[in-house]
Amino acid sequence: MPPTAQHWVIGVDLGGTKIALGLIDPQDRIVTQQRIATAAEEGPVTTVARIAVAVEVLSRHLPAGASVDALGICTPGPVNHVTGMLIDPPNLPGLHNAPLRDTLSARLGIPVCLEHDAKAAALGEFHYGAGRGERSMVYIVVGTGVGSAIILDGHLYRGAHNSAGEIGHTMFDPDGDLCACGSRGCVETHLAGPWLARRYKRARRCEPALGRAVSAPEGDTTITGEGVARRAQNGDKLAQQVMTGAGKALGVAVATMAMVLDVDFYVIGGSVSKAGELLLAPARETMPHHCYKSVGRRVRIVASELGDDGPILGCGWLARQRLAQT
């Protein structure tokens, strides 16, 4: 049956701490959502059972005579979208080498597809958000880590080994901090949420008065990347300096991708992107200095329109494509 307007589908965004599910109507709107704890340590069978219960709750909102026809789920990588396997995602230790797609499909009795979370978010933005009407687009997710998904001429570009887009682990400063990947000065060490918190704490130890100018004293363990962004929005000068540095790193990353890919449109998502212009303005200012002027003039950097709904809607789009194959 073709993926025409009669189908209701569910999109699932499985993260390190929570699972967000959305029931998507035939007009590609999220009608209602559920959130449950991930508890990956309980293993794939229990995780699938809990997702199935949440799907049942969402199904109560279906109109009479309608049913959920397919489900799309995304997770942190690495994943194998062809076999439907989670491989060894660092934040999901209980779900390593888990055949999540097939286990879910067997439990629910409907077609299921599995995708990397950044790629699902990119598809959501491309089809329903900031990328509507674009031919090609790069989605850069800035959260606990930094990654990207590349859409060329309407299709995901995966690379030979499904690892295209790891912009977070390109070098920004050869003498910089040691990254978890083993290299030094990666873009991620200047831009990801945990690194923003680390840089803010480090800078505050050097300039304690400036760090306390607006915010009340706060224990180091409570400072997060999102917290640094909030402080910057509230006028904390030190936090603003940290966010400016992050924006510059983002600008260099975009310039690099623009030179390599010849793509003009970049959508920034993830938790850190909620800082808005505190992050995007320095990125736009920096980017033209690290690529050809002719390239820099074409590049556009915008914030996600869909936010946390992007991965869910992207998974819904994938579920509809899965239906086209049945």
Image (cartoon, rainbow, N blue to C red):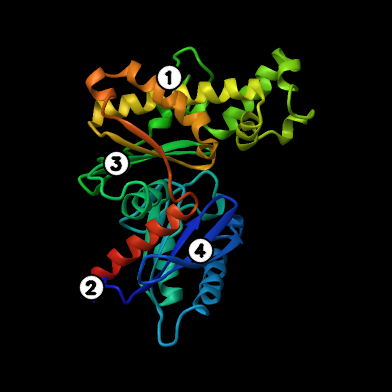
Which quarter of the figure is the N terminus placed in? Answer: bottom left
Of helix, strand and loop, which one carries label 3? Answer: strand
Q: Residue furthest right?
A: 217
Tell me how far mark 3 sits from mark 2, CA to CA: 26 Å
Marks 3 and 1: which is nearer the front? 3
Q: Please name the amino acid that badge 4 sits on.
A: Leu
* 197 on left or right of 167: right
Q: Please name the amino acid that badge 3 sits on.
A: Met
Marks 3 and 2: which is nearer the front? 3
- Tag shown at residue 172: 1
- Tag shown at residue 137: 3
Judge whether 189 appears above or below 306 on screen: above
Q: Which residue is mark 4?
A: 21
Mark 3 and mark 2 lie on one chain; the one further toward the N terminus is 2
Looking at the rendering, which quadrant does residue 157 occupy? top left
Q: Please name the amino acid that badge 2 sits on.
A: Pro
Q: Which residue is mark 2?
A: 2
> Relative to the observer, which residue lies in front, 184 or 199?
199
Tell me how far mark 2 sits from mark 1, CA to CA: 46 Å
Residue drawn at the location 60% of the way across and 62% of the way down: 36
Mark 3 and mark 4 lie on one chain; the one further toward the N terminus is 4
Give the x, y percent position of residue 294: 22, 21
Of helix, strand and loop, which one carries label 2? Answer: loop
> Relative to the observer, which residue lies in front, 74 or 271?
271
- Are the residues tagged 3 and 1 within 8 Å (C-beta)? no
* 1 on left or right of 32: left
Tell me how far mark 2 sits from mark 4, CA to CA: 24 Å
